[in-house]
Image: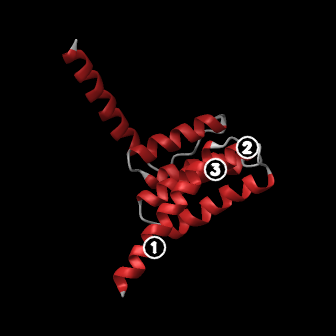
Amino acid sequence: MKKILSVSLSLLAACSILNGCVSLSKEISQDLTAEELKLKAYEYSANSNYKAAERYYQEALKRFGSNIEVSISCKYEMAHMYIKQKKYDKAEELLTEVLSYYSTNPMLPAQYKKLSENDLKKIMDKKSKQTKNKK
């Protein structure tokens, strides 16, 4: 049983790696839903293919960005991805946008508000440390 599980996980990892290497020139299917686009983006991000992940998040925003929940989740996930890449200014900009949605609509799901606040605090702490290290 353990051997089957191990082989299955190895195959899954190999497929994920190969999927992450797919060319970006490939057209994104027009029939994908917002959730499918976000899932693809998440998979690419999890495999450190940030360029492809960003492309899928941007496509979800382009197609479904008028839905505030799609907009919030895509912008938060992109910001989180930028933090992983140490692109703090880009992340800060997106997290600030996410938090601005909550100032006008407090009934939105709270998880992205809290996550954005936490990530923004981490960015500010890192920037503060960088400033201290330069002195």
Which residue occupies 75% across, 44% down?
Answer: 67
Three-letter amino acid code of the residue under disc 2: Leu
Residue 74's place in the image compared with 90, above or below, is: above
Question: For mark 3, what is the residue?
Answer: 113
Three-letter amino acid code of the residue under disc 3: Lys
- The answer to which of marks 1 and 2 sits earlier in the sequence is 2
Q: Is residue 12 left or right of residue 24?
A: left
Foreground of the two, 16 or 119: 119
Q: Identify the element where label 2 is drawn.
A: loop
- How many marks can you see? 3
Q: Identify the element where label 3 is drawn.
A: helix
**Mark 3 neighbour density, 10 Å: few (under 14) some (14–19) many (20 or more):** many
Which residue occupies 48% across, 54% down?
Answer: 81
CB contact under 8 Å: marks 2 and 3: yes
- The answer to which of marks 1 and 3 sits earlier in the sequence is 3
On the image, the x and y values in percent for residue 77 come to: 55, 49
Question: For mark 1, what is the residue?
Answer: 127
Three-letter amino acid code of the residue under disc 1: Lys
Which residue occupies 39% across, 74% down?
Answer: 129
Question: For mark 2, what is the residue?
Answer: 108
